[in-house]
Image (cartoon, grey):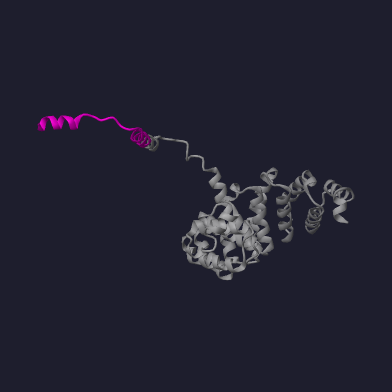
Amino acid sequence: ACLAWACARAVPRPLGQTALAQRGMSYKAKAQKTVHRPFEHQAPYHKVEKDASPEAFMQAQMYTPEALQPENLTRNCYRMVVYGLAVPELLDRYAVRAIELAPRLQPSQFSVILNAFARAHCRHEQMLQAFSKRMAPRLSQFLPMDISQTCNAYAKFRERDEPLFRRFSSEMPHKLPLFEGFQLGNVANAYARLSIRDDLLFDDIADEVIRRPQELAAAALLLVANAFAHFGNQHARLWPVLADWLLESYLDLAAEHVALALNALSTVSFEHDALMRTFVRGLTEEPLASEVL
């Protein structure tokens, strides 16, 4: 009797429609969980665009610089200025945090933060002092872009830190061949705006301009010309090269740029007949004539 009862219990019984449906859905769910979709999460482009928008940025870390580490502090400071979201009170908090992190900042981070504050026309004395102190021993690690941006920022701040710029002067000569054309112009312009004269450095800059003038756009040529004129530097080999390439690129010059170039040439008493005729003719024709009026 016991054996018969056990056999009866072992006989499979037919399932109803509801049970079959439930079991089928269960198997389907299990199968779905194990399906591998290798390309489903590998195109986060929309997420990147959303994260990079000003709205997402405002909702993230912008208002808590005290909690940021060097990389995020640098990135957020730059984006805040680029997006036009910078206000003096917030920039002041960023400066305080940058001072705290100064011992850990990389050369590129120094230059980006300084450049962001310069673009926002926000000068913070304590930050400049802390950065000057921390940057000076590490100038050997600065790349051309770092040097160019730092010099440019100090020039915009009118921060005449002569000891720091003397250190830059000793560090730059062997790196100048790696500078882009616009970076040469920025460095020369910074020294001129701060009236820090260094004839040896300017001789090296002149050599680079003479060696590759085609790499300097019209704006960079003007910066170099005005910087040398500021110090009355009548470099015998540089001015003919500057004049020739200004003549080549005069179509890119606005009326005010032509005036600056003429002023630089007259300051060092350099004459270039073809350039003078071209400039004078250009100022009497459109579109420069309208700009002059």
212 left or right, relative to 13: right
**Residue 19, above or below 237:** above
* Residue at image location 67% in from the left, 56% down from the top: 188
Expressed as whole percent of the image width and height from the top left, the position of residue 52 reads: 57, 51
Q: Residue at x 87, y 48 (%)?
A: 286
Q: Residue furthest left?
A: 1
Q: Which quadrant would the C terminus be assigned to in this image?
A: bottom right
9 in relation to 89, above or below: above
- Could you tell me residue 107's position as x and y percent? 52, 56
- Answer with the quarter of the image where residue 168 lies: bottom right
Visible residue check, residue 290: yes
Magenta region, main secondary structure: helix
In this rendering, the count of numbered labels is 0
Residue at x 51% of width, y 63% of height = 65
Residue 175 sits inside the magenta stretch = no
153 or 3, which lies in front?
A: 3
Magenta-highlighted residues? 1-27
Question: Which residue is at the front of the view, 247 or 12?
Answer: 12
Residue 89: x and y, percent? 59, 69
Residue at image position (59%, 62%) is: 165
Q: Can see residue 174? A: no
Return the x and y of residue 122 as percentages of the image width and height: 63, 66
Residue lying furthest front in this view? 1
Task: Look at the image and tell me in which quarter the N terminus lies.
Answer: top left
